[in-house]
Every structure is written in C-alpha cells, then in structure tokens.
Image (spheres, helix red, strand yellow):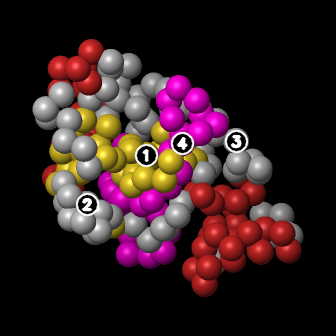
Amino acid sequence: MRQQTAEHREAARRIWGHFADPKLHSLMEAVPAPYVYPGDFLGQPHLEYRPHPDELPDPGEVVWAWVPYEEDFEIGKDRPVLVVGHDGPWLLGLMLTSKDHDRDKEEEASHGRYWVDIGTGPWDQRGRSSEARVDRVIRLDPRHIRRPQGFKIEPHVFERVAAGVFQHRR
C-alpha cells in the first residue's frame, strides 16, 4: 500500500470523525475523487450477509447515503440503504422507502420497480415499516456513507430481500 497523503488522512477524519481507521485508506485510494457516480450495478450481484459490530458499513446493515435518481445521476437524496455486497471498491446497496408499495404493486411493476418488506428498524426515527427496492442495485462510495455504523437486519429478512433481487433483476 502506498504511503497515505495528509489529504487522505484529513478526508478520513472529516468523513468518519473519530472512527477514522487505517482499514479505510485502501478504500479511499481505490475510489476516484471527486465523487462521480459510476452508474447502477448491472447483472446479478453476489449478495452476502456479513454484518460486523464496528463503525464500518457491512453487507446486511442499513446505512444512510446519498442515492442518485435513476433518471439523472447528478441529483438524488439522502436515504436509508441496505448494503448487500461489494463491487471492487464500491459497496452495493438497495434503497429503502417508508412508502407502502403494496397498494400500488401493479403500477410499480409496470414500471419495472419491485419492493420487498423489511419491517421496522432504528434507521427510521418514526418507527415506520420499510421496503427495499430489489430491481435496482446502486453503487455506494464508502466515503460518502452518512452514518457508517449500520443497523443490522435479521438473516431471514436478508434472505427474503436476496430472493427478491434474484427474481426481479433486469
């Protein structure tokens, strides 16, 4: 690993606060800066459930991150995301919503959007039930995760989400 610059160390402190960790440095070098969204992940992702009780985002955890809109990757919004795997230096994630799509299931499906219920968790301060969008897999720059210490979901919930991803990927 090449020697870290002061800029990398400062970026780690700004992004991760007191959680700045040398393990992040290789990720910080691997992801291009300034951040440019590389596009959604295409194909079938390798999904893994590997939550760890640390300050880093792991597959099987819900984190907060900026998610680009499908129609224009230059704009988006902060939202909860279920981390489901990796693609090189990128994390792979599924965006969550508190909107109940059971009521408009057919309309959503006509637009190629499919949702799986994951229940409630501490990622939603109002305690609302969430759904994961399983037909779109987004790439996340680990440096741009808003709350890196994720909220672990249960293994059976992850399995249900994974089944939805495999069923509905384009």
Helix, strand or loop at mark 3 = loop
- Residue identifier under label 3: 36
Residue type marked 3: Val
- Residue identifier under label 1: 93
The residue carrying pointer 3 sits among few (fewer than 14), some (14 to 19) or many (20 or more) residues within 10 Å by Cα, namely few
Looking at the image, is 115 positioned above or below residue 112?
below
Q: Give the distance between the C-alpha atoms of the residues marked 3 and 4, in whole angstroms.
A: 13 Å
Q: Give the distance between the C-alpha atoms of the residues marked 2 and 4, in whole angstroms.
A: 25 Å
Helix, strand or loop at mark 2 = loop
Q: Which residues are magenta?
A: 47-76
Q: Which mark is residue 153?
A: 2
- Residue identifier under label 4: 76
Of the two numbered discs 4 and 1 on the same chain, state the one appearing first in sequence. 4
Helix, strand or loop at mark 1 = strand
Residue sitting at 20 percent across and 58 percent down? 128
- Magenta-span inclusion, residue 112: no
Residues at discs 1 and 2 in contact (Cβ within 8 Å): no
Of the two numbered discs 1 and 2 on the same chain, state the one appearing first in sequence. 1
The mark total stands at 4
Of the two numbered discs 3 and 4 on the same chain, state the one appearing first in sequence. 3
